[in-house]
Image (spheres, grey):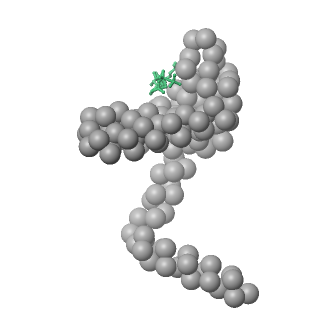
Amino acid sequence: MSANDSLQRLHEVIESRRQGDPDKSYVARLFHKGTDAILKKVGEEATETVMAAKDGDREKIVYEVADLWFHSMIALAHFGLSPADVLRELERREGLSGLEEFAARKAQARERQGD
Ligand SMILES: N=c1c2ncn([C@@H]3O[C@H](COP(=O)(O)OP(=O)(O)OP(=O)(O)O)[C@@H](O)[C@H]3O)c2ncn1[C@@H]1O[C@H](COP(=O)(O)O)[C@@H](O)[C@H]1O
């Protein structure tokens, strides 16, 4: 089973909870609470990831990144998106140097300011 398949399977479980019972499903509960609650969890898990990394705790980093990915996937689904959309964007960037992309973006911004 590839990483893509695992993410897609989790996405399908998340989607299946959209109209679920908030008393029986954590995902359904978060969908029910809405945008702010979902984004708050993404923020919390990102912070916890940073804290685990600052501690250099490799096991905790994996645990917190799993929480972060999971809650980010709920956020994606909430906005009608899926992991496939993110993977497509990462594939689009393949072979594109981050530094070159940054320089091109800066040049574009300078051109816009000159307009
Ligand atoms: N991968 C996960 C997953 N990761 C984390 N969590 C839950 O996310 C919650 C929030 O994590 P926290 O660390 O913040 O825990 P907390 O301290 O209880 O939360 P707070 O009080 O801080 O808000 C916890 O209750 C975790 O159990 C998850 N809950 C569900 N899944 C997947 O989603 C599927 C559907 O879950 P249900 O919707 O509950 O059926 C499951 O089968 C799993 O595959």
Instruction: Please provide percent x and percent y for residue 39.
Output: 60, 38
Residue at 57 percent across and 24 percent down: it is: 27
Residue 52 horizontal side relative to residue 45, left or right: left
Quadrant containing the C terminus is bottom right
Horizontal arrangement in the rendering, residue 100 relative to residue 2 (left or right):
right
Q: Quadrant of the N terminus?
A: top left
Q: Nearer the viewer, residue 83 or 109?
A: 109
Residue 32 versus residue 89: which sits nearer the camera? Answer: 32
Identity of the residue drawn at 39% across and 44% down: 50
Using the rendered image of the protein, determine whether residue 90 is visible from the camera's viewpoint: yes
Residue extending furthest top? 23
Q: Residue at x 63, y 16 (%)?
A: 22
Q: Residue 98: give x, y in percent of width and height.
A: 42, 70
Residue sitting at x 56%, y 17%: 25
Residue 2 visible here: no
Report which quarter residue 107 is drawn in: bottom right
Q: Nearer the viewer, residue 5 or 30?
A: 30
Above or below, 2 against 114 in this view is above
Tell me if residue 20 comes above or below residue 101 in the rendering. above
Q: Nearer the viewer, residue 59 or 29?
A: 59
Q: How far across and down, in percent of the image, does residue 68 sit?
A: 46, 38
Residue 109 location, quadrant: bottom right
Residue closest to the far bottom: 114
x, y percent for residue 69? 46, 39
Q: In this view, does 41 lie above or below 93?
A: above
